[in-house]
Image (tube, rainbow, N blue to C red):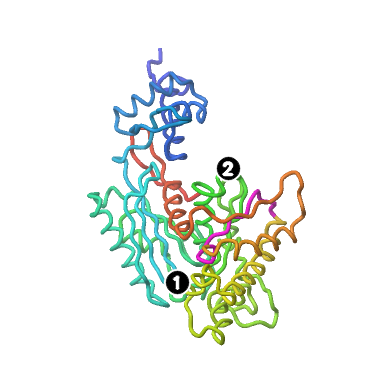
């Protein structure tokens, strides 16, 4: 007679499968009450209660008092002892690093300016040093860091961690960026385009929650879009899906940094906007333009509004092809609110096929300029599986 209680179909294997299902639900949502866990997993409340007690005893999960519908409840989260992840955003002029646990709680963060045309080696050195500094700040060991998500302002081939379009981030081409940083930190590193990670963050934590299909538009020093289709990032064959900044707007326009002529980015990117204002306003930075647009300066509001209309026309073409539930607008220019988003929304809705049953929503992102770094956190979390014994296993990027 077979006495192996762990054979498929046995009570032991069923209990283990239920434990894994519950742990996965807690990780996916960042934390749920036991009633919510029963609904998310399809398990009975009695089974959930039993498994939660087992997982608490094993140090896999922990509970915190919360409130649901005015009533006290116990929220179940992955225990801090399981480990931490880091989200990193490398911008054209700044670096931001965030440490978070598996309950999606940010435990430490820091940012610093970067010089223009910053080099790959020194840039990655700064990333590694900041991450180690933050770990020390929260009293964590380096082996508690389980994964790093890295957002870059360029198209990325997620299979290799390499930038897939030459010249967009000068000096960073032809390098397996994820592998280089992974060796410095001795932990897996997952590299992704910043607009894609903005899309992931707004889907998981922000304005696109509940939408299976959404577009995130990043209007900043450059312009790009990220797509979430069926709750998963859509990157395209080599990571260039959503690169609306390189859609040709004027065939005889200026040369873009990608090598083509008349791209949208040459019209609505920071360099173009600042040049339009040079005669009337003198030398400005993009932050100056945003601040003055918010304060009501007519010239700054005009260039931001015109940029919104141009971006909206490009987004409309994208939206017509994929029919999303919502378009979320982020990036620094979105800090101007309806100055940018109003004309962008009008252009999108004017060009897409009108749907009276399910009209397309165009909204400002909820996460602001933190969307990309929180998307890097989400990428690291999604890429790390937690076993029922509390151990972590690195998987493939979502």
Name the one closer to the observer, 41 or 324. 324
Q: Which mark is residue 151?
A: none
Q: Which label lies toward us, 1 or 2? A: 2
Circle 1 is placed at which residue position? 92
In the image, 63: left or right of 302? left
Residue 284 in percent (x, y) is at 48, 80
Q: Which residues are magenta?
A: 322-334
- Whether residue 393 is visible: yes
Residue 101 in percent (x, y) is at 35, 45
Figure check: 366 above or below 26: below
Circle 2 is placed at which residue position? 210
- Whether residue 389 is visible: no
Identify the element where label 1 is drawn.
Answer: loop
In the image, 303: left or right of 50? right
Figure check: 354 above or below 337: above
Crowd tier of the residue under label 2, counting other residues whose Cα lies within 10 Å: few below 14, some 14–19, many 20 or above: few
Figure check: 17 above or below 90: above
Identify the element where label 2 is drawn.
Answer: loop
Q: Earlier in the sequence, mark 1 or mark 2?
A: 1
Figure check: 181 above or below 187: below
Name the one closer to the observer, 10 or 98. 98
Residue drawn at (36%, 42%) of the image:
392
Residue drawn at (36%, 55%) of the image:
98
Name the one closer to the observer, 98 or 346. 346
Name the one closer to the observer, 205 or 375. 205
Q: Quadrant of the N terminus?
A: top left
- Residue farthest to the front, as pictured: 296
């Amino acid at each position: 007679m077979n006495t192996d209680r762990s054979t498929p179909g046995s009570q032991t294997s069923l209990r283990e499968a239920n434990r894994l299902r519950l742990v996965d639900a807690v990780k996916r949502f960042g934390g749920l009450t036991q009633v919510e866990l029963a609904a998310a997993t399809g398990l009975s409340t009695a089974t959930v209660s039993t498994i939660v007690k087992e997982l608490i005893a094993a140090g896999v999960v922990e509970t915190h008092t919360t409130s649901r519908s005015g009533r006290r409840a116990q929220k179940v989260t992955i225990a801090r002892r399981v480990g931490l992840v880091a989200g990193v955003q490398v911008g054209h002029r700044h670096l931001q690093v965030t440490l978070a646990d598996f309950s999606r709680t940010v435990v430490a963060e820091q940012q610093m300016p970067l010089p223009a045309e910053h080099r790959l080696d020194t840039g990655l050195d700064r990333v590694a040093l900041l991450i180690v500094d933050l770990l020390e700040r929260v009293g964590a060991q380096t082996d508690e860091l389980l994964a790093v998500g890295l957002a870059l302002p360029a198209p990325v081939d997620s299979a290799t961690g390499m930038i897939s379009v030459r010249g967009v981030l000068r000096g960073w081409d032809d390098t397996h960026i994820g592998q280089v940083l992974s060796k410095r930190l001795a932990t897996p590193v997952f590299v992704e385009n910043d607009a894609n990670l903005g899309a992931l963050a707004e889907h998981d934590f922000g304005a696109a929650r509940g939408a299976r299909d959404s577009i995130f538009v990043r209007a900043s020093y450059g312009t790009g879009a990220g797509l979430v289709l069926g709750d998963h990032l859509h990157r395209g064959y080599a990571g260039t899906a959503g690169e609306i900044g390189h859609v040709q707007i004027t065939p005889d326009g200026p040369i873009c940094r990608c090598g083509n002529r008349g791209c949208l980015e040459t019209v609505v990117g920071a360099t173009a906007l600042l040049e339009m204002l040079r005669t009337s306003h003198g030398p400005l930075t993009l932050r100056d333009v945003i601040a003055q647009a918010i304060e009501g300066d007519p010239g700054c509001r005009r260039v931001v509004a015109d940029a919104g209309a141009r971006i909206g026309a490009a987004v409309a073409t994208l939206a017509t092809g994929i029919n999303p539930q919502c378009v979320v607008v982020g990036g620094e220019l979105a800090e101007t609110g309806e100055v940018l988003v109003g004309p962008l929304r009008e252009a999108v809705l004017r060009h897409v096929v009108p749907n009276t049953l399910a009209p397309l929503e165009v909204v400002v992102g909820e996460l602001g300029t933190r969307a990309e770094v929180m998307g890097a956190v989400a990428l690291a979390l999604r890429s790390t599986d937690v076993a029922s014994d509390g151990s972590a296993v690195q998987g493939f990027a979502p």
